[in-house]
Image: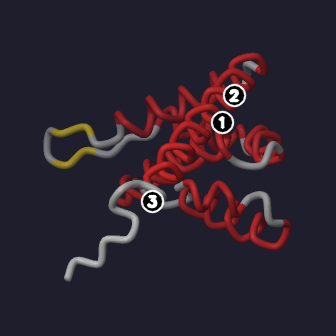
Amino acid sequence: MNQIANDTYDYEKYGVVMKALWSALDNQASNWRKVFKGLSLLEHIIKNGNERSVEDARDHMHKIRSLTDFNFYEGTIDRGNGVREKSQNIIELLQDNERIREERNKSQKLREKFTGFSGAQQGGAYGGYSGS
């Protein structure tokens, strides 16, 4: 998901990413997994991607809001619950500029922490180990 979020900073890739994202949210109820994954990706992009994705999401608020009524049952199991909860969380996030700023800052610090961690590991004691 981080790579997809990074692709939103590329002008040419941004349109492709967002078109695929909105397409995923248009799936039928029987494809609830794709809808849920699309919402998860949207949340990740809002927190980690290009800031214009926030405005894009706000422009599509009607689509996200319609998913708060999402229903799909497999037998007696409510598979739409995760979609309803995720869409409601995204709506609440998009309506609060301060929370978006906090989440983006928190995500940036987390990325920096892990980038520093993986960078430190590359030069570690096992950096030249060939396994022979």
Q: Which quarter of the image is occupied by the C terminus?
A: bottom left
Q: Residues within 10 Å of mark 3 (few under 14, many from 20)?
A: few
On the rendered structure, is 69 left or right of 107? left
Task: Give the image quarter of residue 33.
Answer: bottom left
Which residue sits at x=49%, y=49%? 120
Q: CA distance from mark 1 to mark 2?
A: 5 Å
Q: Secondary structure at mark 3?
A: loop
Comparing 78 with 102, the one in front is 102
Which residue sits at x=83%, y=46%? 52
Q: Secondary structure at mark 1?
A: helix
Q: Residues within 10 Å of mark 1 (few under 14, many from 20)?
A: some
Q: Amino acid at mark 2?
A: Asn
**Looking at the image, is 119 positioned above or below residue 67?**
below
Sequence order check, earlier mark of 2 and 3: 3
Percent coordinates x, y for residue 34 in the rendering: 43, 58
Q: CA distance from mark 3 to mark 1?
A: 34 Å
Q: CA distance from mark 2 to mark 3?
A: 35 Å
Q: Secondary structure at mark 2?
A: helix
**Looking at the image, is 12 positioned above or below residue 45?**
below
Q: Which residue is mark 3?
A: 28
Q: Which residue is mark 2?
A: 105
On the rendered structure, is 85 left or right of 131? right
- Residues at circles 1 and 2 in contact by the CB criterion of under 8 Å: yes
Q: Amino acid at mark 1?
A: Gln
Percent coordinates x, y for residue 65 in the rendering: 62, 34
Comparing 10 with 74, the one in front is 10
Q: Residues within 10 Å of mark 2 (few under 14, many from 20)?
A: some
**Looking at the image, is 128 positioned above or below residue 95?**
below
Q: Amino acid at mark 3?
A: Gln
Which residue sits at x=61%, y=34%? 107
Q: Which residue is mark 1?
A: 108
Percent coordinates x, y for residue 60 in the rendering: 74, 45
